[in-house]
Amino acid sequence: MSRNSAESLKSLSPRRICIIKPSALGDIVQTLPLLSVLKDCYPEAEISWVINKGFANLLEDHPLIDKLMIFDRRGTWASWGGLLKQLRSHRFDLVIDLQGLLRTGVMTLATGAKTRIGLETAREGSHLTVNGTIPETTRDVPAHARNWRLAEFLGYAESTKETQIFISQEDQVWADESLSTLQQPVLTISPGAQWITKRWPIEKYAEVAARAVQKYQMGVCLIGGLNERELCDPLELRLRELVPDLSLVNLAGQTTLKQLSAILQRTDLMLTNDSGPMHLGAGLGTPVVGVFLCTDSIRSGPPGTQHSLVSTTVECRASYKKQCPCTGDAHMACMQELDVARVWTAFQACVETNQLAQSDAA
């Protein structure tokens, strides 16, 4: 899209806008700041968002979203057809496909919208379903900056990036009660990730956390989805072996996304793999110590000097492979190469940067 295209886009007066960004959690979080930009640019427009069923809770009750349109990835052909009919019936004027996959391309085309825009990262033929592409949105552009290119394109580059999540009083109270027994400051650990190649070993998480408890008298909160209890439960056991009088709560498998957000709002520091919860915490203002193995900390990490991001240095680092591409002694070598000492150094730097240290006892 050219400068003239930008002027043309800004001069639109759409009545209905649709954002197509069904997944994943981290990508959704990094898209949220665009809502206020779109509302400022098109104050009269209604905004809809196509969202995966499993992530809908995060966007519920958002005052800038007029309608959530649910995509059930595991649904029937009938539910898929129903979504496409719903998209067509809303008569959208402007559609923004920020996912760029075959299924979102089909959704985009189904709207019949006159103006359909996407990113340069579009694949699986989805680029054929848009009639405009935001420039400088290739994969070498950090994900958070890639989405924000739309704001820049519309002339809102200097707008504040706000990750707004609207949490009920009930969920706020639940979070307070869940953390009420913990020592302060609170360290929240997210040891899971969708890809096995992103998961730093539990034993190493335990060593870093034990040092944090001993040096800074931190309380520990473990988080993860229901399927990540298999990581959080052994992490809890190992931590209690290392620090018998540990102040800890294990909330893995017990939170909705809004409850998780409330927990992260009350977290002083987060230790995490590259994952959706990492971006959720960072978006909500929580300092992050991020561990990067098969992904790149610059390309995939959160922005901001308040975070400490540490990466492996193996030759195949940042391969973005869901399964390790190496064999023999090199197989999953990043897990050993990225040692506790380097992550602990990053952890201490994050504590100092954010002035979280209450004691230097150990």
Image (spheres, rainbow, N blue to C red):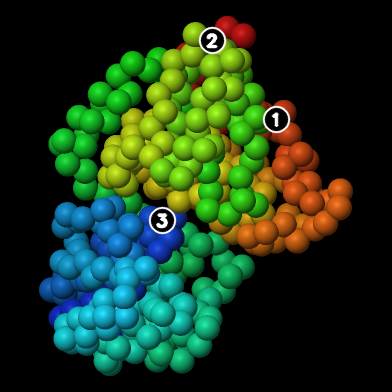
Residue 88: x and y in percent read: 22, 87
Q: Which residue is mark 1?
A: 340
Task: Count every numbered label the image shows and give the total.
Answer: 3
Q: Residues within 10 Å of mark 2 (few under 14, many from 20)?
A: few
Indicate left or right for 158 with 190 as reference. Answer: left
Q: Where 165 sits versus 44, above or below?
A: above
Residue visible at 34% across and 77% down in the picture:
96
Q: Earlier in the sequence, mark 3 or mark 2?
A: 3
Residue visible at 65% across and 37% down in the picture:
201
What's the amino acid at mark 1?
Val
Indicate left or right for 261 with 333 as reference. Answer: left
Asked whether the viewer can see residue 234, the reply is yes
Residue 316: x and y in percent read: 77, 57
Query: In the depicted view, which residue is nearer to us: 197 or 34?
Result: 197
**Between marks 1 and 2, how big is the CA–CA gap?**
21 Å
Asked whether the viewer can see residue 135, the reply is no
Residue visible at 15% across and 66% down in the picture:
66
The disc label shown at residue 25, or none:
3
Circle 3 or circle 2, nearest the eye: 2
Residue visible at 42% across and 28% down in the picture:
250
The part of the image, by quadrant, that contains residue 349 is top right
What's the amino acid at mark 2?
Pro
Q: Residues within 10 Å of mark 3 (few under 14, many from 20)?
A: many
What's the amino acid at mark 3?
Leu
Q: Which residue is mark 2?
A: 244
**Between marks 3 and 2, how big is the CA–CA gap?**
34 Å
Indicate left or right for 68 with 351 as reference. Answer: left
